[in-house]
Image (cartoon, rainbow, N blue to C red):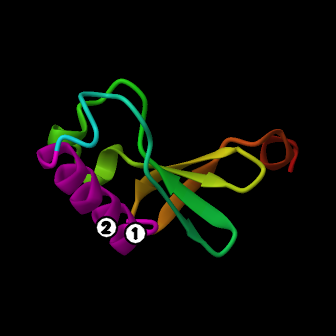
Amino acid sequence: MLLEREREEIVRACRKLSAAGLMVGTAGNVSVLAGDLVAVTPSGVDYAELAATDVGVYRLDGHLLVVLDIDRVLDLSPEAAAA
């Protein structure tokens, strides 16, 4: 999984924040910057029930990278589509 360790760290942080009452329901976001990619919690998901596979991975220009499996990543940016 792309940024697997970082995405799992986000899940652990969200669960701790939720358990401490510092993050209620779906309010707020948690992210991790890793090189030229950022992993970010999704909107509308209860962070106490978040899974690492729910955490999105984006390029710094904001384009979502869809992780198809451990070896394949789909870049949804217009630049990648034109290539």
Give the residue drawn at x 18%, y 51%. 15
User: Image height check: is 24 above or below 21?
Assistant: above
Quadrant the N terminus occupies? bottom left
Give the residue drawn at x 71%, y 45%. 62
Q: Where is residue 40 in the image (x, y as percent from the top left)?
A: 48, 49
Residue farthest to the left, as pictured: 19
Residue 40 is left or right of residue 11, and the answer is right
* Nearest the eye: 23 or 57: 23
Q: In the figure, residue 23 lies in which quadrant?
A: top left
Distance, label 2 to label 1, CA atoms, is 5 Å
Determine the secondary structure under disc 1.
helix
Give the residue drawn at x 40%, y 69%. 6
* Nearest the eye: 55 or 74: 55
Q: Where is residue 30 in the image (x, y as percent from the top left)?
A: 43, 50
Residue segment shown in magenta: 1-20
Count neighbours of disc 1 (C-alpha within 10 A) and say few if under 14, some if 14 to 19, many if 20 or more. Answer: many
* Nearest the eye: 71 or 29: 29
Residue 6: numbered disc = 1
Give the main secondary structure, helix, strand or loop, of the magenta stretch. Answer: helix
Q: Position of residue 45 (x, y in %)?
A: 29, 30
Q: In the figure, residue 16 lies in which quadrant?
A: bottom left
Q: What residue type is labelled 1?
A: Glu
Residue 71: numbered disc = none
Q: What residue type is labelled 2?
A: Glu
User: Image height check: is 74 above or below 9?
Assistant: above
Tell me if label 2 and label 1 are in contact, CB under 8 Å: yes
* Residue that badge 2 annotates: 9
Specify whether residue 11 is painted magenta.
Answer: yes
Q: In the figure, residue 46 lies in which quadrant?
A: top left
Determine the secondary structure under disc 2.
helix
Q: Where is residue 18 in the image (x, y as percent from the top left)?
A: 19, 43
Give the residue drawn at x 31%, y 50%. 53
